[in-house]
Every structure is written in C-alpha cells, then in structure tokens.
Amino acid sequence: MAEPLLRVKDLKKYFPIRRGVLQRTVGYVRAVDGVSFEVERGETLGVVGESGCGKSTMARSILRLIEPTAGEVWFEGENLLRLSGSSLRHMRRQMQIVFQDPYASLNPRYSIGYTLEEPMIVHRLHTPAERKRRVRWLLERVGLDPDYAKRYPHEFSGGQRQRIGIARALVLQPKLILLDEPVAALDVSVQSQVLNLLEDLQDEFDLTYIFVAHDLSVVRHISDRILVLYLGRMAELADAEVLFVDPLHPYTRALLSAVPVPDPDAKRERIILRGDVPSPANPPHGCPFHTRCPVAMDVCRSEVPAWREVKPRHYVACHLY
C-alpha cells in the first residue's frame, strides 16, 4: 500500500493559562488533545465539529503556523516538527493554507499582483517576467480577470477575495492545501461556486485537501472521509457517505440531526444536546462528551473510550462499541 501523503500522530496543542504579577502558569487550555489520522494522496479529508473544538488550531499546528505542544506530523516521510531553517522552508512550499476570512487574509497595502508574486519572491522562483505571467495565469484559472492584478483588496467582494486566496495557495504548486472554513463567510450562491472551483483545481493539479468546516452539508459535498472532533479529541472517522448513513457516535448523530433537509414534508428526529460545551481548560474526566451525552453510562464518567475500528474504515471513540 502506498505511503500516505500526511500522517498525524498524537498531535497536541496546549495553551498556557498565566496569572498573577509573575505570570505563572496555573493551567492549560487543551485545544488539541491527541489527534491522529492519515491523508492519502488526492484525498479530501473533512474535519467537523462545533466552534471551539480545535479544528482550526489543529490545521495551523500541522503547518507549524503555531507550534504544537507534542506529537508528530509526517509529510512525505519527513517529520515536520524536527525540521528548521531551509529544510522547513523547502517543505512549506508543498503545503499551503486558505484562511476563513477573505477580508483579513489579504494585506490591504499590497496590490493583488504583488500578493500573489510575494511567495515566489520569498522562495526565489522564476524571473520577474515569469512571475508576472504566472500571476495573470493563476487569476484567470480561478475565474478572475488577469488585469485585476493591478487592483487592491478593498476593490473586491468576499467571493472574489477568497478566489484570490485560493490563487495565492496555488502559487508554489503545493501538494497539500488546508482549507480553514473557506466558504463560511460567503453567501450560499458564492459558496457553491467556490466549492466547484476547489474540486476542479483538485483534479487539475492533483491536490490533497484537509477541509475544515462546521457546515456538514458542505463537508459531505466535497469530502472523501470525515473526521469529527469534540473538545480537541477525535470522536469518529469514516467515509463521508457511511458517516451520513450510519453515524455511530452520539455526538455525530446530534450534529447530523441539525442539518437542514430541503424537503418540508421530511420527518426527522432532532437530537437536542443539553448544556454547554465544557471548557477545554477543565475538560471532564472520562469521555469528554459524557456531560451532554443522552446515552451516557457509568463507565463514561471514569474511563476515556479507546479509539477503535468498529467497521472497515470506520473508527469511533465510544464505550457503546
């Protein structure tokens, strides 16, 4: 079997809580707490969960935009957490990110042409004339007029800015792109255009995606597999269609019950989770979901459930299985 493009093993990111005049560390916010998964070449892995469950922190930790506390991130056989200097810079050409907010992710002082050209300047790629030709080609490839290279971010709509963000991610010809809720800030009609563009680009450039989102209908449309996170930990991982047809974890069932159905006559039982998400600074003992779980047992309050393959390619962390 071919080596996966990306392998994440027991990834953790804890943010220290400091108090007092001396700013002593009195605890930690466990934003990501032991996440492990693999991503095959050409695959799209969707990552879902409620706000604050650690999706974006996990994505940024993989790229070392924020430094992980512990764990391993293997990309094409190299442990990224052991690289530094020129080795890390070379590897970063292979991995890019598209941020959630298309308004904040572009520098308002830079023209669009310079924004797209800058990564090539940093990595010393191509001549000035070749860089400008590539910028115009990329703008056209993401559905924008090449002459937009002379304009500035404030002259574009949200959907156009996100297309520019996608073009910037493609500049260095990466193999892996992390999409951090790339359509969350866009209108529904624009969302579908951007999703279709991402699928076309994936086929054309042989890209691998990690698609972070909270909208399950969007994730189902674009993902091959889906990873469900809760309070920084893995709850379930399965093929996209399998997860929607046969969800195993009570948290996954609750998430799916909240997805709107475009049929006014369709009947579906809505699962209402009681209480709020516990604080990642003080997570509950045992299963992190037991405080809100409608089928919690005594063992859930004392033991952390093991991560098991219950069915072929279907993993879950739950004492029910």
Image: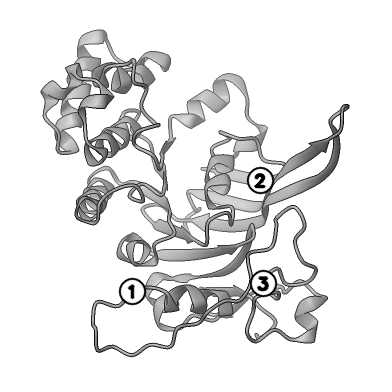
Question: For the residues marked 2 and 3, what is the alpha-carbon distance in whole angstroms?
Answer: 25 Å
For label 2, the residue is: 72
Question: For the residues marked 1 and 3, what is the alpha-carbon distance in whole angstroms?
Answer: 23 Å
Of mark 2 and mark 3, the one earlier in the sequence is 2
Question: Is 240 placed above or below 26 here?
Answer: below
When asked about the image quadrant of residue 163, the answer is top left
Which residue does the image show at 15% across and 24% down from the upper left?
A: 148
Of mark 1 and mark 3, the one earlier in the sequence is 1
For label 1, the residue is: 260
Which residue does the image show at 77% across and 57% down from the upper left?
A: 282
Question: For the residues marked 2 and 1, what is the alpha-carbon distance in whole angstroms?
Answer: 37 Å
- Using a 10 Å C-alpha cutoff, classify the residue at mark 2 as few (fewer than 14 neighbours), some (14 to 19) or many (20 or more): many
Q: Which label was assigned to residue 222?
A: none
Under mark 1, the amino acid is Pro
Q: Which label was assigned to residue 289?
A: 3
Q: Nearer the viewer, residue 292 or 145?
A: 292
Of mark 2 and mark 1, the one earlier in the sequence is 2
- Using a 10 Å C-alpha cutoff, classify the residue at mark 1 as few (fewer than 14 neighbours), some (14 to 19) or many (20 or more): few
- Using a 10 Å C-alpha cutoff, classify the residue at mark 3 as few (fewer than 14 neighbours), some (14 to 19) or many (20 or more): many
The label nearer to you, 2 versus 1, is 1
Under mark 3, the amino acid is Phe
Which type of secondary structure does the marked residue at label 1 adopt? loop
Which residue does the image show at 38% across and 56% down from the upper left?
A: 43
- Side (left or right) of 173 relative to 18: left
When asked about the image quadrant of residue 268, the answer is bottom left
Q: How many labels does the image show?
A: 3
